[in-house]
Image: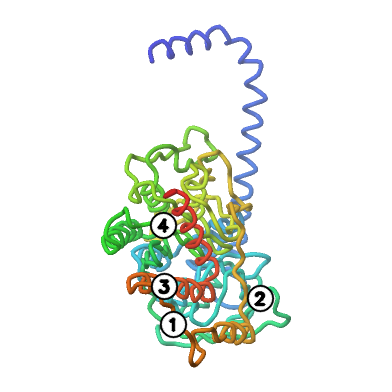
């Protein structure tokens, strides 16, 4: 440090004459810039006073200032905004996993509200709202021209109250109305199920409960299957997961990685960048993994998918993710409000930014649209008669009881897989893929 100070002082002395010649224009330029800023602030003050004095109706000065602050922030990007004291309190409640509303994560695009994803089991999900839907009207009033927070404010209301939103959906010719009853949204961060010998971890959001839920659910499922040796793989389902806390995305990624970078963030100042690395310990003990994503997988979901994909820890299956590659920092302000400001971009371990590009799956699998006629055809196919249905058929005398029982169990498993294929084709594909990988590893 002393050497640095001395070198600086020497440089100052040696360059004194040259600095005097250059400093003048630099100081003048800075003075002009400061003068321009002060002039703009004077203009703002002038407009503010004229509105207060001459607007056709009396205005609330606090609301006026908050609107000006929010306008300044929302002009930067779709994710920066001002949070009033109520909004800031609501956001803290949401990260804890319970809040009131419709159950959709939204952004703004072309002046309209765009659904990033509906949240599993919420009123919006049950009403059929889909990722990629555009909301153009709320209770008949257009949201065009409103800020995102203003549009979201229109959708809020008392629990049990009814709201009608007008939706524009790709592939549907006309806008249509959807009636939703507001409810308390209780987020179960992770739901666990077992399909055959595959453990499915459905992660719906990244809040304070995500990693604990995932860790406990995975451990319980392994125990239910009789030990990790009986598990053929893990499906991490991140479809329609709008993201959430960066810290939880890092923990979930670390749960399946032993070492290496998980994600890095870079802001305007290179020195403020951060890098997050995995620690030793893989909860799945190296078992094969498939990560499911779609257009509703955003932010923290993309961090997890990108990390596991770059480390070749998992095969990513589904469709391209949303493409939100920025980090927002919530900064408390005076008066209990807060400012949500985009402060950095994040990068996957290979150094790629997914901003506006998304994570591309290793295997693209679309979720087919099921029409009622298709369901009837599938039922007819399953009902086709076989030799076993014929009266007076010959019995199979070449099988022992144990062999017959094994064949029946395998048939039941195959039928269950077929039902899953009809119910959720992408998940069925992931489960079948893990079965194949497990079979290969046993040869």
**Dot placed on the residue nearer the N-terminal end, 1 or 2:** 2
Q: Position of residue 110 (x, y in %)?
A: 68, 65
Mark 1, residue position: 395
The label shown at residue 398 is: 3
Compared to residue 203, the image places residue 345 above or below, namely above
Q: Position of residue 160 (x, y in %)?
A: 41, 87
Foreground of the two, 206 or 213: 213
Q: Residue at x 55, y 38 (%)?
A: 351
Secondary structure under tag 2 reads: loop
Mark 4, residue position: 234
| Mark 3 surroundings: few (<14), some (14-19) or many (≥20) residues within 10 A | few
Residue 207 figure quarter: bottom left
Task: Please identify, in this view, whether the residue under mark 4 or under mark 3 is nearer the observer.
Answer: 3
Mark 2, residue position: 169
Q: 118 left or right of 228?
A: right
Disc 1/disc 2 C-alpha distance (Å): 55 Å
Quadrant of the image for the N terminus? top left
Q: Residue at x 61, y 9 (%)?
A: 17
**Dot placed on the residue nearer the N-terminal end, 2 or 3:** 2
Compared to residue 424, the image places residue 327 above or below, namely above
């Amino acid at each position: 440090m002393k050497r640095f100070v001395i070198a600086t002082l020497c440089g100052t002395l040696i360059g004194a004459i040259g600095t005097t010649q250059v400093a003048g224009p630099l100081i003048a330029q800075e003075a002009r810039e400061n003068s321009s800023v002060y002039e703009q602030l004077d203009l703002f003050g002038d407009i503010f006073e004229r509105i207060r004095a001459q607007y056709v109706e009396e205005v609330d000065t606090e609301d006026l200032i908050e609107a000006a602050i929010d306008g300044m922030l929302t002009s930067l990007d779709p994710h920066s905004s001002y949070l009033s004291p109520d909004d800031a309190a609501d956001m803290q409640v949401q990260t804890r996993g319970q809040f009131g509303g419709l159950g959709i994560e939204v952004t703004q695009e072309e002046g309209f509200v765009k659904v990033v994803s509906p949240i599993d089991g919420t009123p919006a999900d049950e009403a059929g709202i889909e990722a990629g839907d555009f909301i153009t009207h709320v209770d008949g009033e257009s949201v065009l021209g409103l800020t995102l927070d203003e549009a979201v404010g229109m959708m809020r209301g008392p629990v049990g109250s009814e709201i009608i939103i007008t939706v524009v959906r790709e592939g549907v010719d006309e806008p249509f109305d959807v009636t939703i009853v507001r409810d308390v949204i209780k987020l179960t961060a992770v739901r666990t199920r077992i399909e055959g010998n595959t453990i499915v971890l459905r992660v719906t959001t990244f809040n304070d409960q995500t990693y604990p839920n995932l860790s406990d659910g995975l451990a319980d499922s392994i125990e239910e299957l009789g030990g990790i040796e009986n598990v053929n793989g893990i499906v991490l389902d991140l479809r329609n997961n709008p993201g959430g806390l960066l810290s939880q995305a890092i923990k979930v990624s670390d749960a399946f990685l032993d070492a290496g970078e998980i994600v890095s963030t870079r802001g305007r100042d290179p020195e403020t960048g951060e890098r997050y690395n995995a620690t030793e310990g893989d909860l799945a003990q190296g078992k094969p993994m498939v990560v499911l994503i779609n257009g509703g997988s955003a932010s923290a979901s993309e961090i997890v998918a990108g990390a596991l994909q770059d480390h070749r820890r998992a095969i990513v299956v589904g469709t391209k993710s949303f493409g939100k590659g920025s980090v927002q920092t919530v900064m408390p302000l005076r008066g209990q409000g807060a400012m949500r400001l985009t402060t950095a971009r994040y990068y996957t371990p290979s150094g790629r930014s997914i901003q506006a590009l998304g994570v591309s799956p290793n295997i693209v699998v679309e979720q087919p649209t099921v029409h009622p006629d298709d369901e009837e055809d599938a039922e007819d196919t399953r009902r086709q008669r076989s030799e076993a249905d014929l009266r007076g058929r010959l019995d199979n005398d070449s099988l022992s009881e144990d062999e017959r029982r094994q064949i029946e169990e395998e048939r039941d498993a195959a039928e269950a897989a077929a039902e899953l294929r009809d119910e959720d084709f992408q998940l069925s594909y992931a489960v079948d893929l893990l079965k194949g990988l497990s079979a290969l590893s046993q040869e």
